[in-house]
Image (cartoon, helix red, strand yellow):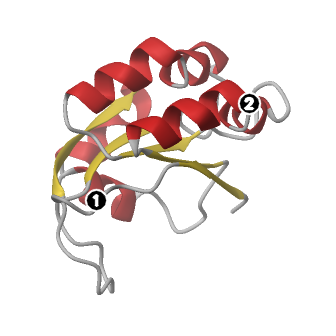
Amino acid sequence: MNEVVVGGTPTGLGKEKVCFVTVGATAPFDGLVRAVLSPPFLRALSRAGYTTLRVQHGKEGKLNLFQDLSTAPETVELSNGLHMSISGFDFNTDGLDDEFQNAKGLQARGSKDAVTGEGCVISHAGSMFHSFL
């Protein structure tokens, strides 16, 4: 799993609130990656109390799109100002269950981290099933 982490650190004043975005493993969805890293979307997440944006961006899309967009100076500056952590990975051979648990505000298996505030999952229909489990 290749992972990129950028942006501000959540303030710690409340529970972490996670927005998990998954494009799935079988088809590229560059439009979704672009949309969730756009300043209007990041500001909307912040206004809704989100502290963490986690993106499973897949391996099939435009090479390094997530890395290019998430590490752009304007994105880093905005995420720092919003105290929002942005991280992403291409594929996890262990599956996405822990990501879904974190977005639901539940402790991931084997994690000693505190339980988080309930967040959300944004996905295409193919990987949506797991978020209901």
Callout 1 amino acid: Asn
Does residue 100 appear anywhere in the picture?
yes
Residue 65 is tagged as none
Residue toward you, 9 or 5:
9
- Quarter assignment of residue 112: bottom left
Residue 102 is tagged as 1
Mark with earlier residue (1, 2): 2
Q: Quadrant of the N terminus?
A: bottom right
Q: Is residue 109 above or below residue 100?
A: below
Q: Position of residue 61 (x, y in %)?
A: 75, 27
Does residue 124 appear anywhere in the picture?
no
- Dot in front, 1 or 2: 2
SS state under label 1: helix
Residue 72 is tagged as 2
Q: Is residue 87 above or below residue 31?
A: below
Give the residue displayed 55% in from the left and 43% down from the top: 56
Residue 3 vs residue 65: left or right? left
Residue toward you, 120 or 77:
77
Q: Position of residue 102 (x, y in %)?
A: 28, 59
Residue toward you, 111 or 81:
81
Q: Position of residue 25 (x, y in %)?
A: 61, 40
Give the residue displayed 32% in from the left and 46% down from the top: 51
Give the residue displayed 54% in from the left and 17% down from the top: 38
